[in-house]
Image (tube, helix red, strand yellow):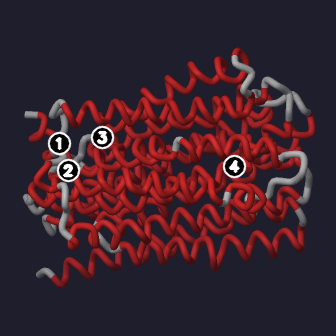
């Protein structure tokens, strides 16, 4: 049975095999999702308008904030689901799943209403100036109108991962990206919608991904299904989702805040610099999705085995994951170092943008082997229901290290100093986060002897 195969992978599959089996499909799905922004950037770049390229980068924190709010439900519910499955409590898992669907619907409507009410203030806060304000506003307003689809697609993918159905979580993501790739040139060029067309294609791509996930639930392809009898979930279930999910959302919001600080500093060097950094972020996302895929892949394993109190397996899987992600990211770094100007040149023909972008990419790529281990540590804390520990890692990383380093290094060394802030931060955080995580696992094991 498919259920037995999924549980076997979580419980006893050889660690490296389990990491690859659950991580690689997510990486492939995330690669496909990366095309949401890459395709937008590529087609907007064909218009040879660097202000529109800069606007997409300026608007990106809005997507991050939507993901942050989705994390409240997606991460909180999937963590609880994995622990319930590990403890063989299917009813609690399905009650949590049902609550997550209801919270997604309410949350999506609330975000759209609040975002539209404060639209101009949001756009100014993102760092948009006179030459980028209108383009940024056009993109943001469409994204806000489609918020329910973006949140729903993200949350469903998280819920499917929580029960170990990694393959199904990938299907929705891939379907959405295919739709986005098809619609982008139609909306941008054929219908002359420009940057608003790129946003519309992104929204409809997410809608398609959400629709696919709902079909999988409706046809009983998943381990768990939402139940009508749980349409009024208990307060204890809502609390558990918020207990883990709210800190996860705060983590993403803090990352968004750091991104906005970074963009505002970059904006002081001109729109071409913002455009270059936006392109770099899109290209770097391929490396980011590798470590995020492996980290998300081990989440259900860690949650399941924490629920089953199998701490030895937790350590074995974690070590296998850290070795796998570090080795893979070193290969990615080599590709970026060798092909940086060519990769930037895929999105723009402006020589200054290519020059700055290549320099930035060859600097920030040094985060990859380190941030992967930090991400695994943070997501493991979320998976085992210790959100305060996960939030603590992010607070240290973004508030105590990254943002101060951005400001200090920019003040002392200018732009070149600013872009070294993130690599320095990630080197420190790798040591701190992994040490804290293994210490927690050892303490939990000793307390259960």
User: On the rendered structure, is 161 left or right of 250?
Assistant: left
Q: Earlier in the sequence, mark 3 or mark 2?
A: 2
Which mark's residue is nearer the viewer, 1 or 4?
Answer: 4
Q: Is residue 28 visible?
A: no
Checking the image for residue 10, the label placed there is 2
Query: Residue 196 location, x and y as percent?
Result: 69, 34
SS category of the residue bearing label 3: helix
Report how far apart the C-alphas of labels 1 and 4 lie in the structure: 38 Å
Checking the image for residue 422, the label placed there is none
Report how far apart the C-alphas of labels 1 and 2 lie in the structure: 7 Å
Q: Which residue is mark 3?
A: 166
Up/down of 294 relative to 432, above or below: above
Q: Which residue is mark 1?
A: 6
Report how far apart the C-alphas of labels 3 and 4 lie in the structure: 30 Å
User: On the rendered structure, is 351 left or right of 23?
Assistant: right
Checking the image for residue 59, the label placed there is 4
């Amino acid at each position: 049975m498919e259920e037995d195969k999924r549980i076997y992978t979580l419980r006893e599959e050889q660690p490296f095999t389990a990491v690859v089996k659950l991580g690689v499909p997510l990486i492939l799905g995330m690669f496909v999702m990366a095309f949401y922004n890459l395709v937008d950037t590529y087609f907007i770049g064909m218009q040879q308008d660097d202000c529109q390229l800069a606007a997409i980068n300026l608007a990106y924190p809005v997507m991050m904030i939507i993901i942050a709010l989705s994390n409240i439900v997606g991460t909180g519910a999937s963590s609880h689901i994995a622990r319930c499955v590990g403890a063989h409590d299917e009813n609690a898992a399905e009650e949590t799943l049902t609550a997550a669907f209801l919270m997604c619907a309410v949350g999506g409507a609330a975000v759209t209403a609040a975002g539209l009410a404060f639209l101009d203030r949001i756009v100014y806060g993102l760092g948009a100036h006179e030459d980028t304000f209108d383009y940024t506003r056009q993109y943001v307003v469409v994204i806000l109108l489609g918020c329910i689809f973006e949140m729903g697609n993200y949350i469903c993918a998280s819920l499917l991962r929580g029960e170990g159905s990694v393959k199904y979580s990938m299907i929705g993501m891939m379907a959405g990206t295919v739709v986005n790739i098809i619609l982008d040139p139609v909306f941008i060029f054929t219908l002359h919608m420009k940057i608003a067309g790129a946003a519309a294609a992104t929204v409809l791509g997410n809608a398609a991904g959400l629709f696919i996930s709902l079909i999988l639930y409706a046809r009983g392809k998943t381990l768990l299904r939402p139940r009508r009898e749980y349409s009024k979930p208990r307060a204890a279930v809502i609390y558990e989702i918020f207990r883990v999910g709210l800190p996860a959302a705060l983590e993403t919001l803090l990352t968004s805040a750091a991104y906005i600080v970074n963009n505002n500093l970059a904006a002081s060097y001109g729109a071409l610099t913002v455009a270059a950094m936006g392109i770099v972020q899109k290209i770097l996302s391929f490396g980011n999705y590798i470590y995020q895929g492996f980290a998300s892949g081990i989440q259900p394993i860690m949650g399941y085995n924490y629920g089953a109190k199998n701490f030895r397996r937790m350590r074995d899987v974690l070590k296998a994951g850290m070795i796998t992600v570090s080795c893979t990211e070193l290969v990615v770094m080599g590709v970026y170092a060798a092909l940086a100007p060519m990769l930037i040149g895929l999105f723009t023909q402006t020589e200054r943008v290519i020059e700055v972008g290549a320099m930035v990419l060859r600097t920030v790529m040094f985060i990859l082997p380190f941030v992967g281990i930090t991400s695994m540590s943070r997501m493991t804390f979320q998976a085992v229901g210790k959100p305060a520990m996960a939030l603590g890692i992010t607070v240290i990383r973004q508030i105590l290290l990254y943002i101060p380093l951005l400001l200090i290094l920019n003040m002392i060394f200018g732009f070149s100093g600013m872009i070294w802030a993130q690599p320095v931060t990630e080197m420190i955080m790798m040591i701190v986060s992994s040490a804290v995580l293994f210490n927690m696992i050892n303490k939990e094991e000793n307390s259960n002897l």
